[in-house]
Image (tube, rainbow, N blue to C red):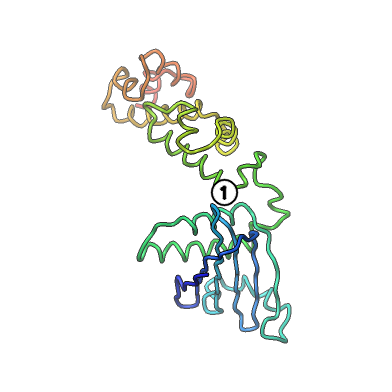
Amino acid sequence: MVQTADYITDGLQIEHETLRDNIDTSIEINYYFQHKIEIITRFQIEGKSYQYKFSYSQSYLNRFENSFEKPFSLFATSSLFHNEQSDVCCKLKDVFVQLANTKLKGVYHTIFLESQALLVLLHTHTDCDSQQEPTCFNCKFLNDPIEKQKIMQARVIVMINLSEPPTIPQLARAVHINECYLKKGFKEMYGTSIFDFVQQQRVHKAKQILKSNKLSIQQLALELGYSNTSNFTNAFKKMTGKAPTEWIKEFS
């Protein structure tokens, strides 16, 4: 077990340990009489177990005015006067994935750690309320942050390759996910199929280029990966209700 003090600043301390044993994901919140909040997170990512401890002092919490006065007023007779467990919602799981996988160094790592500490503070006191977030996704596999990240990576790959997007099998292999899960997960996260998403993004890019008048309709169709002008015109009209030439006239 290796313990590291990752980040210490005025009022905020972050420590983490790499644990040897497999553990269940959990959140423990301690409210101290000295107006300090300590949040201990334990989680497992890709077979490795971690514990992060975030300590927020009164001076640090004072930045948020009186938001944390209520829990501190519950018990005022002992040093550690209130302890509770918080639900681990999908937003917290996303934070855990980011903490485990970050490659940032130096000042950027410092900024990253404080941003994650603030997200932990936020989600443990608001977003992870069981009444606000009973479930995260209908596709249960998306509740695993690693699987969700694969869908997000697939979207990035599509965005980078709009002119020549990969096929579903190619995209599934690229992000290491089942084709069916890829299609279902993409539809649920972004509200559209991968094919329609490509068309939407192509049309969005076409509008930006058309505004500049730098390319002809024929050149633009080729630039966006359409085999001919007719296919581009049909896709553009389907998304906007107007042909590219009509849209240009109306815009100008």
Question: Relative to residue 224, is residue 189 depicted above or below?
Answer: below
For label 1, the crowd category at 10 Å Cα-Cα, with few meaning under 14, some 14 to 19 and many 20 or more, is many
Question: Relative to residue 153, is residue 89 depicted above or below?
Answer: below
Q: Nearer the viewer, residue 38 or 66?
A: 38
Q: Nearer the viewer, residue 53 or 74?
A: 53
Q: Is residue 205 left or right of residue 214?
A: right
Q: Which residue appears at 56% of the width and 66% of the height?
A: 51
Instruction: Specify the quadrant of the image occupied by residue 243.
Output: top left
In the picture of the structure, the residue carrying the numbered disc 1 is 145
Q: Which residue appears at 55% of the width and 78% of the height?
A: 57
Q: Is residue 33 left or right of residue 8?
A: right
Q: Position of residue 250 (x, y in %)?
A: 39, 23
Indicate the quadrant containing the C terminus: top left, top right, bottom left or bottom right. Answer: top left
Q: Nearer the viewer, residue 213 or 100?
A: 100
Q: Position of residue 244 (x, y in %)?
A: 39, 20
Q: Which residue appears at 53% of the width and 70% of the height?
A: 1
Q: Position of residue 78 (x, y in %)?
A: 70, 86
Check disc 1 and report its element: helix, strand or loop. helix
Question: Relative to residue 64, is residue 165 depicted above or below?
Answer: above
